[in-house]
Image (cartoon, helix red, strand yellow):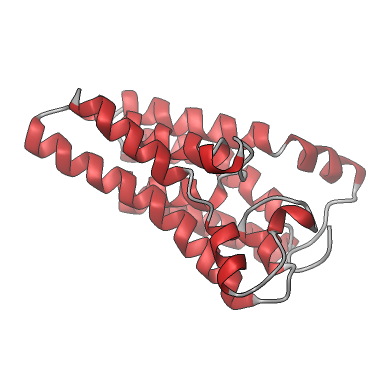
């Protein structure tokens, strides 16, 4: 019962789209109406309002981190075990991908997954984020940075987490993130993928 409430909370938290919230706050067009039409920080950046993109990034990452931290607290208080933390991590990520508040059409999960990884293990999050930053500085392509980070995150998890349910969860999140980027993979292959801050 307690675990079920935790998972529902995490999913609903994940369903809050900070791209839509930030766009509303800064009186910007709905991020689903321009650029890549993805409700995420990179697309909000295409509006030209950097502050809105930062709010989106911090909000989406923050909800992933918060869901894991709440799960870890409840794990300690109620003795739920690592399965509860793993379930909450996956639930908040699925909430972002398939938000009930946006007719189940959400973002690609890059910022939210970063927040989740930081919550699971600080260094796991840092190494994954650094991977994104390094690739982004070299390529200037957000999707390529996300894809390479997703590929390496499970490897980092193998060294930094117990090789159990949490590592499996990180791997699952990485696979889902890669699947959500399938159109970007096509664009990367054809050389038509937009660079950071540019139109789609």
Q: Position of residue 142 (x, y in %)?
A: 69, 56
59 up-or-down from 4: above or below: below
Number of numbered markers? 0
Pick whichever, 71 or 168, lies toward us.
71
Pick whichever, 25 or 129, lies toward us.
25
167 up-or-down from 61: above or below: above
Name the residue rendered at 27%, 34% in the picture.
Answer: 6
In this image, 131 relative to 168: left or right? right
- Note whether residue 54 is visible: yes
**Picture quadrant of residue 34:** bottom right
**Picture quadrant of residue 161:** top left
- Note whether residue 118 is visible: no
In this image, 114 relative to 194: left or right? left
Name the residue rendered at 27%, 25% in the picture.
Answer: 4
Name the residue rendered at 61%, 45% in the picture.
Answer: 107
Pick whichever, 36 or 123, lies toward us.
36
Quadrant of the drawing holding the C terminus = bottom right
Q: Position of residue 192 (x, y in %)?
A: 90, 51
Q: Position of residue 36 (x, y in %)?
A: 78, 52
In this image, 181 relative to 6: left or right? right
Q: Position of residue 115 (x, y in %)?
A: 41, 52
Name the residue rendered at 32%, 39% in the picture.
Answer: 9
């Amino acid at each position: 019962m307690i675990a079920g409430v935790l998972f529902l909370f995490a999913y609903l938290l994940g369903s809050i789209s900070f791209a839509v919230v930030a766009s509303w706050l800064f009186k910007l067009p709905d991020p689903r109406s321009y650029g890549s039409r993805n409700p995420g920080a990179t697309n909000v950046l295409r509006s030209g309002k950097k502050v809105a993109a930062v709010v989106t990034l911090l909000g989406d990452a923050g909800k992933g981190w918060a869901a894991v931290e709440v799960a870890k607290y409840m794990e300690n208080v109620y003795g739920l075990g690592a399965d509860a933390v793993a379930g909450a991590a996956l639930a908040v990520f699925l909430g972002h991908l398939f938000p009930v508040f946006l007719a189940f059409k959400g973002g690609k999960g890059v910022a939210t997954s970063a927040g989740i990884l930081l919550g699971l293990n600080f260094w796991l999050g840092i190494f994954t984020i650094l991977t994104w930053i390094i690739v982004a500085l070299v390529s200037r392509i957000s999707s390529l940075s996300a894809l390479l980070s997703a590929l390496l995150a499970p490897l980092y998890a193998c060294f930094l987490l117990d090789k159990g349910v949490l590592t499996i969860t990180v791997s699952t999140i990485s696979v889902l993130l890669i699947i959500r980027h399938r159109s970007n993979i096509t664009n990367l292959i054809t050389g038509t993928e937009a660079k950071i801050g540019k139109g789609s």
